[in-house]
Amino acid sequence: MADTGDETAEESVAEELADARRARTGDRIAFHGGPAASAIPIGLFILWAIFQSGVLRVSDTTGLVVGMLLSLVVGMFFAKGDWKTYANTIFEGMTQRVAATAIVAWLWAGMFAETIQVGGFVGGLVWAADALSVGPALFPAITFVLAALLATGIGTGYGTVIAFTGLFFPAGVLLGANPTLLFGAILSGAVFGDNLAPVSDTTIVSAVTQDADIGGVVASRFKYALLAAVPAFAGYLVAGSVMEGAEIAGSADVLAGQAEALGLVHLASIGVVIVTAVAGRHIVEAISWGLVVAVAANLLFGLASLSEMLLFQAPANVELAQRLSVLPIVTTVPATSDRIAVSGAFYDGAAGFFPLIVLTLLIVAGARIMIRGGGFAAIQDWLLSRVATSVRRAETTMVLGTASVNAMITINTAAEIAIAPYVARIGERFNINGYRRANILDANTSALGYIFPWAGGVLVGYTEMRGLVGAEEFDWFTRELLVNPAEVFPFVFHGWLLFGVFVFSALTGFGLEYTTDRESEEVARV
């Protein structure tokens, strides 16, 4: 997370952590069945998501919204006494800054990706792949590397997933890459960047909550990231050569029609985002500058008209609309037409995320109820007293505890904030170094935030993917090419390997450092 005006990234994270402390110390919600009953909303939602996406293979974000709504309703019947506190906690949870941060990043990234998409960037990628002889076997591995570089540079895995799903995914599918494998490679790249980027909010949260400096944390976790990334890259090479791509009718003609070198001018648009973000500007500012450059490039090079980026389609019987139709962004349609609407890249890029935004707010609200109901505290206290009885078991508890929280809270930063105090307590009890604790916390949060079918990182990519169906520039992309979130999780190679590296490290002591082994020189404290 980069600077916002005079506000530093650390100050922004401090606000989120202060909000989490208020949740733990505020009014408690008593439940019939004790603290465990506070997990009912989140638990029911997970069961709903598994049934809908895994069993029935129904990929519908709005369906998940309904599932979370009903889960919150069911949970309310287990709350003791006046339900006012329960209801107010829902509102309180939905207004958390951590959720708003993710939502804003999605909206800006969606508009940006859609704008360079209509500007022919996908066609430019197809042309470049053909010119460089990058076939379907190599494309997923290359995508993994490029996504990892972008996510590390701009510090947002979610933004990377949106951009690559809207741009690299259709290009790779058209070239013959397996869609499920390709989506997994994009998610893996996001995992790498979220874990390593110094400006990533997960990196900052892990460092601040474990009393470690950000630079030292990033440097100390590089070896773990490489141990996972190298075999992940090899895995995409092997899988890319054996997994067949999707059948696309007339693919040769489509390829010939899509390939256009001029679309690569939008590499400059992406470059502006990366440079601005690396320079320390807020990700919203960085993407906004990239959007400005993308719009200018579309108009200057004739890649897309203004009406393709924004168009008001007004009823013809409105006199003022007829007068304004001389403007390039206004047109009139019959008053009885079903095409009366706002359209274009800006609209499409933002509108597709509205169901996911509602789902995210509801899930964070459910997590807030579990915190206020004492569910999180009960789980962590039990782990601390019964399981974490030695250094090896303590570190294993950190790894598996972080994994379990990420299974319940789909926004990885929110999950990290929820579990961080308990990781600190366990680590301090056994004198485990802050760098080590921060690495365990961040690596598992980054990895598992892009694996579970109901995780925010997966759903944000699927939402962007659904936007390809019916898009004018991708008339060949049908619903059959969509990747069900329940099918991609085995192919997020880097995520699984990074999780495996830390399970191995916890069990064997690989990389273990005690507080006396190394002291943080510039601790970023809240």
Image (cartoon, helix red, strand yellow):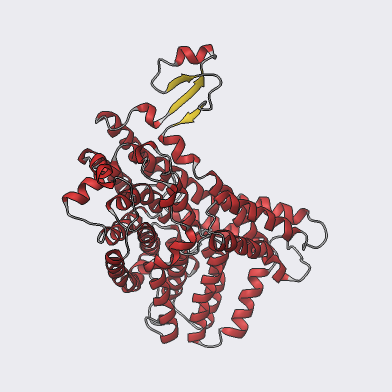
Q: In the image, what residue occupies the spot 48% across and 86% down?
A: 392
Relative placement, left or right, of 316 versus 300 is right
The quarter in which the N terminus is drawn is: bottom left
Q: Nearer the viewer, residue 390 or 21?
A: 390
Q: How far from the left and from the top, in percent, is residue 277? A: 35, 49
Name, please, the residue furthest toward the bottom.
390
Q: Nearer the viewer, residue 235 or 55?
A: 55
Q: How far from the left and from the top, in percent, is residue 328? A: 38, 21
Q: Is residue 96 visible?
A: no
The picture quadrant where one finds residue 415 is bottom right
Relative placement, left or right, of 508 versus 33 is left
Q: How far from the left and from the top, in percent, is residue 150? A: 32, 54
Q: How far from the left and from the top, in percent, is residue 75? A: 72, 60
Question: Is 360 placed above or below 383 here?
Answer: above
The picture quadrant where one finds residue 235 is bottom left
Q: In the image, what residue occupies the spot 55% across and 60% down?
A: 17
Q: Is residue 411 visible?
A: yes
